[in-house]
Amino acid sequence: MSTTAPASAPVASPDRVEIVPRKVPVILTVITVALALAVALGAQDGDTTFRLATGKDLFQLPDVVVPAELTAWIGIVVMALVSVDSWRRQLTGHRTPMWETALYAVVGLLAFLAWAAADGTIPMVGLLSGSLALAVPLVFGALGGVLGERAGVVNIAIEGQLLFGAFAAAIVGSLAAPPLVSALGESAGDFTGAIVASAGAAFAGMLVAVLLAVFAVRYFVEQVIVGVVLNVLVIGVTSFMFSQVLAPNAATLNSPPRFRAIDIPILGDIPLIGPVLFRQTLLVYALYVAVALVTFALWRTRWGLRLRAVGEHPKAADTVGIKVNRTRFRTVLLAGAIAGLGGASYTLVAVSQFNREMTGGAGYIALAAVIFGKWDPIRATLAALLFGFASQLQGTLSVIGSPVPSQFMLMLPYVVTLFAVAGLVGHSRPPAASGQPYKLG
Amino acid sequence: MQLALRNITKRFGALVANDHISLTVEPGEVHCLLGENGAGKSTLMNVLYGLYQADEGEIVLDGEVQSFAGPGDAIASGIGMVHQHFMLVPVFTVAENVVLGNEQTGFAGKLDLEAAREKVREISARFGFHVDPDAVVEDLPVGVQQRVEIIKALSRDAKVLVFDEPTAVLTPQETDELMGIMRQLKSSGVGIVFITHKLREVREVADRITVIRLGKVVGEAEPTASNTELASLMVGRAVELTVQKDAPTLGDDALVVSDLVVRDDTGLAHVNGMTFTVRAGEVLCVAGVQGNGQTELTEALMGLQEHVAGSITLDGKELVGRNVRQVLDSGVGFVPEDRQVDGLVSSFTIAENLMLDRSFSGPFVSAGTVRRADLDAFAQAKLEEYDVRAPGITTQAGNLSGGNQQKVVVARELSKDLRLLVAAQPTRGVDVGSIEFIHKQIIATRDAGVPVVVVSTELDEVVALADRIMVVYRGQIVGIVPADTPRDVLGLMMTGERPAGVA
């Protein structure tokens, strides 16, 4: 052992070998085989028409007509090729790139549609705009979930907030609309009535959030338990009120006004995109604004920086003078208001009536969108849109009459959720302190 | 700014963490607060920083009595803190961390990150820190993260800086650099409170030393005091700082590790091709800065890691691929590095903890039931043999002090037919008196002919125990050197430099 001046001989840095999970190629293969089996067993003759136009576009896109069986098989071949390539990458220690998965999804979907709707017409505009409409509560719910978890509170109560929002919107709308209609006239009165009802929905969502915040933030109760209990509580309260109060007085208490679609000039006339995105109700436009605002606020403002600090490392936030629990409390309230607003879309858009348990677990799907979207508002929105699409697809196909049993089609949104969350999320990292109460000492 | 604490008292229930503590810090002075773990140093600083409210006493700045409702007030009055566990958000950038809580904003509450970057650059330039404002904190080495903490405090115009055990996570070289930074801060007029239990550092940088024991000030010392004087003041009795041990009686090669590679789930190699041998009756100390593969190495030895390649043989039997129980059954004793998480079940009694690794069969279990009487007799004997200070064997492990918890772990692991002892950080957070005891036990195990692997990030401990020292850096072995290797060489090796002449 010499003690002379050390000769510099730095040790090499550790290398990284990709440990690639097998789930992506497995999922791709399973879906390909399933589709191939379906097409082989249920042969469909005839052509499938994809309709891309509506009556009042700037210019008319022609219908796309393809032979059903052939298109399906071409799609299956492409899917098989992607699956094989995915296996090849997996075996050589590489991940399947995003573009390949995306290509697979689009081709697979078109192949499936072409086969399922043989001899029929698929209204693409209706399919996509319907998806957006169905996704509205999911997106609002997911935004509420993202905000809550980013601040360190798991918001399982999204379901309850949606349901209570829907309930409140129905009652507030029913009560507010008649005087407003007599003061402002039929359409303006309905419109303002619906806006008042939406505010009521947001307030109702916030009420549920107050309970969540009091127990989870103030009294450190396990957040998941509180959330689930709140969901059950809201189901109980609204179902009871529905059968005892709303149903007997449906005309005065359960007939809220509706939001009608508003065409945005020029933007609304762009073929395909226009009718899908810009011939929607005020709630959908509010959604665009909400997504943009939440994204900006979360990533670009002081408010967002503090909120994320509280969710990642509350003690660090505390030591620079940020009130951790106050921040969490307020964020949970805001998240509840946003989710509650989403509930309004159940009673103020498609059907203007409240029904018991009408959200049907959408809050849990929104929660899945939060995770699938990696706690990012934009990605969570995209995830919610995907789930909305799965629901709408099921509806559309059951109208056209597809060879797949309707029970299977009803499963679609949930199967998509399961695959998305379990299989395709990949490496994601929740906010470090999500779900952990903060107390000193 | 002059800081004075007067008669600070802080109680937690019946426990008096701080008992009428007074001290003053002048501008441009380094005041060392010396005491063992649990002496009440951190509590005192948390009171100063507004995280706790004092039950009695007052904080005085330049003659004015302050009342801090929270850290925000303390910061506003010019108190800055470099925490032992860094108070940085790992996923934020340096600039974001520095301005957090003190942000400048533009239109619509938009963050002005450019101003934040400028601030980081300005302070880094002033002290020669070389910190990139846009680096994400979790990607930075620990030493640099600590500088971010310092920048954070200085960016809020701190006049008094508290360093809470700042050297615990640093290499010897980084520690030297930190001492330089402290001197620089001092000359710019900042008052410094330096909390530590490491005697060497105290004497190097302190202007004044206050020693705390069991929540009370027990004395002041001059920086010229010797290690032994300081240690006895700290512990309250004379202590042996080094273990008496004879030259080892070496047996055959017992533990043979070759080409060991341990990866985590993301494929990163934390142990990257280690090959070494430990002979019976020998202590091999694994030295290195925390996070260089030591945890993964010990866990791989125990069968706790999933992606392990290479070979580990004990007395000729292969251990790779065996599960933990098989490894335990082949006679491996394991003192894990975090006793609270991996070593004990804190809600179990001492007796229950003592039989944790023998719950399948053996002396304490027959026909699926625990033989309470045998267990109690065993536990009582161990309680006395290992000098565990507890009311009795039914005391919950979580209610013991760190040193006594560790004695329980050591008692359990040494009470079986050992073929190998793996001890990771055996004396971390343990008081000086218990360190002495645990070190003696480890040496006694060695003298009984058992191969021992000790992992430690404390050079003092490494030097005290080792027959040979293996220095690791980034998952690789930098070199295996004799125990009498000079500390500066070891320190250099811990940064990955391989000195000339080391194989």
Image (cartoon, rainbow, N blue to C red):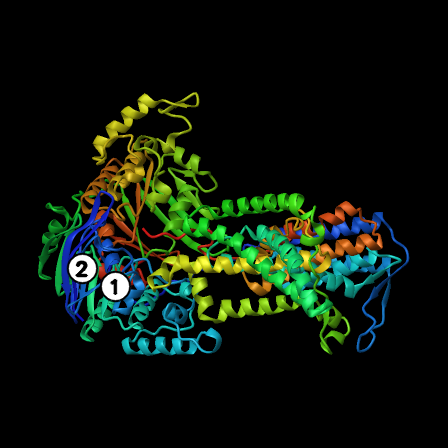
Residue annotated with mark 1: B175
User: What residue is disc 2 on?
Assistant: B58
**Res B24 label:** none
SS at mark 2 in the image: strand
Crowd around label 1: few <14 · some 14–19 · many ≥20 (10 Å): some
Q: Position of residue B357 (x, y in %)?
A: 38, 33
Q: Position of residue A203 (x, y in %)?
A: 55, 58
The one nearer the camera, A438 or B211, is A438
Q: Residue at x 82, y 59 (%)?
A: A114
Parent chain of label 1: B
Task: Find out whether the residues at labels 1 and 2 contact each other: C-beta distance under 8 Å.
Answer: no
Expressed as whole percent of the image width and height from the top left, the position of residue B122 reads 33, 79
Task: Examine the rendered structure and indicate whether residue A153 appears above or below residue A12.
Answer: above
Chain letter belonging to callout 2:
B
Q: Is residue A422 above or below residue A133?
A: above
The residue most toward the right is: A46
Mark 1 residue element: helix
> In which quadrant of the rendered view does residue B478 lie?
bottom left
Up the image or down, B432 lies above or below B74; here it is above
